[in-house]
Image (cartoon, rainbow, N blue to C red):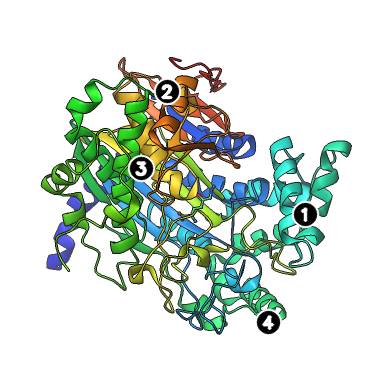
Amino acid sequence: MKRSLLWLPSLLVYALLASLLAAPLRGAPAAIAIPDNHGAEVAEAVLRDGGNAVDAAVATAFVLAVTYPEAGNLGGGGFITLHHQGIDRFLDFREAAPGRASRDMYLDAQGNYVAESSLVGHRAAGVPGTVAGLWEVHRQYGSRPWKTLLQPAIRLAREGFVPHPQLIERTREAFADYEGKTNFREYFGEMAEADASRQPFRQAELAATLQRIAEQGPRDFYAGRTAELLVAEMRRGGGLISRADLRSYRAIWRTPLQFSWRGYTLVTAPPPSSGGIALAQLLGMKDALAAEFKDSPYLSTRYVHLIAEIEKRVFADRAEYLGDPDFVKVPVKELVATEYLQQRAQQVNRTAISPPPSVKPGLAESLQTTHFSILDSAGNAVSLTYTLNGSFGNGVVVGGAGFLLNNEMDDFSVKPGVPNLYGVVGATANEIAPGKRMLSSMTPTILLKDGVVHGVLGTPGGSTIFTSVFQTLVNLFDHGMTAPEAVSAPRFHHQLIPGTLIIVSRCCNLPEKTRAELVAMGYEVRQNSWEFGDMQVIERTPNGGLAAAADPRGRGQARVIELTSRTAKPVEPRSRPAAVAE
Ligand code: DON
């Protein structure tokens, strides 16, 4: 017997054990928190059928590309934080700058930013990563056939679905942005009529694209018929994505950012997202100021001010140090070190607003995204955030292929100091270069307790993503809220520039007294024009059960799924706590 074959029996035992561990256990509940009902139904069906969290995530992500076109996508990119059989991984399928992109590509001859150039139309698109990412996670961790997982999306595209009123409203709003500039109305015009007729909205070209992807995998998207259609669309509109860009695109496994917090381990997004570093900094600085927070009741003026001061420092570091780690050296360890955060927290001004010029990066040396959370009955978890960047991306539908392209190039710093769609600035670390991935704020996160998944959460919201994840964790842990309470509570956000602006979520404002006192301190408190965040949370409850909550700001559904019973228990978000300790 060959020496190597001696390993065979133990390998077989190992493989058997591993598959037993990975197979969802009948009886243990699973949970999902998903931004629309079509996605939720499909995720539940896959889990009931014995699929694991990755299978449910792949099927759901393709469904959202059909039923949640503002953000669900084939033409965008994103991240997955994964816990599978006790192993934690992070998959980066972020878009990349095309080979022909260049640092100043959105500036005119005078060096000024050309309005909308990184946001609307063909030149705003980065090389899409979603299909490569979903294939990669499926290839390594999926347990159901790829083709089967795409069937629900194909059916919904071919047979149609009745659009949700929120989707119809968002589509109508988008017409104004793209009118006369892209082919958006040609593809989504019918959506505007949809509620009157209650007719299903069908997407035949998209169905055919999904069918090709089901049969050929990513080869079709990156080198086959879909690639041809995408490159032809680029030629029609002066876009930069080439055949070579598509062929060379790869999803990348990265080491997730992990840090300890209150006896838990947080597993979250490393660069090219700023989200994980920012979350570690927010939680770390808040803990360093525990004494101050003790005297600052939830949503009081001092509470909001202290958090705004912390956020200022996070955004100063973000703008200076963070970018694609394959292009710039990101000092991750230094930025999340406890001593650094303690020292940085001491710079917080307890009583007055620190003006932006006084808040420097701290190291001593030189609008629409979507998220879903899935936990299967074997304890495997997927936290997935993906995006086209702005709602409906750059507004360009790939002719003949029926899917929207992203405007993720706007997440680069197009020029030092020029704010992007979300008002954040950057410097050289996040400047454009061919093949580089633009800095993100997406923060798909998993919370572990002694190696077991305790929570899964994430949200869209551009630069408000990590401040929202932070506030949701604080709501759960510091303020003892249930998952539905934590996602529906008011959220606020400050990001250094403008130096005195605090934005609050559209649905739920801060208490009136807090607002008045913040204004008296010199802040401007503004309700955001768009609703930031659509938090999707799964949490293990103190009695060992599961709770799941979908943000009432969106149209999501959360369910705890008892696999032994026939019907899942939908979890209704509680009514919003409109009046919070006024
Ligand atoms: O990667 C990022 O940080 C942004 N492109 C995310 C955009 C987003 O969340 C839009 N949602 N409202």
Q: Percent from the top left, x then y, of residue 3? A: 12, 66
Task: Identify which amino acid the numbered label 3 is placed on.
Answer: Thr
For the residue pair 67 and 16, the one nearer the viewer reads as 67
Question: Picture quarter containing residue 41?
Answer: top right
For the residue pair 479 and 424, the one nearer the viewer reads as 424
Relative height, residue 2 to residue 263 (above, below): below
Q: Write down the residue under mark 4.
A: 235
Q: Percent from the top left, x then y, of residue 135? A: 48, 60
Secondary structure beneath label 2: strand
Return the disc, 2 or 3, that comes first in the chain's sequence: 3
Instruction: Tell me the residue at 54%/82% (across/down).
Output: 110
Q: Are marks 3 and 4 in contact (CB under 8 Å)?
A: no
Return the disc, 3 or 4, that comes first in the chain's sequence: 4
Q: Is residue 548 visible?
A: no
Task: Identify which amino acid the numbered label 1 is placed on.
Answer: Phe
- The quadrant the N terminus occupies is bottom left
Q: Is residue 412 left or right of residue 41?
A: left
- For label 1, being within 8 Å of ligand 1 is answered no
Relative height, residue 413 to residue 151 (above, below): below
Q: CA distance from mark 4 to mark 1?
A: 22 Å
Q: Percent from the top left, x then y, of residue 317? A: 28, 56
Instruction: Tell me the residue at 40%/72% (across/down).
Output: 431
Q: Write down the residue under mark 2.
A: 547
Q: Is residue 216 left or right of residue 316?
A: right
Task: Identify which amino acid the numbered label 4 is placed on.
Answer: Arg
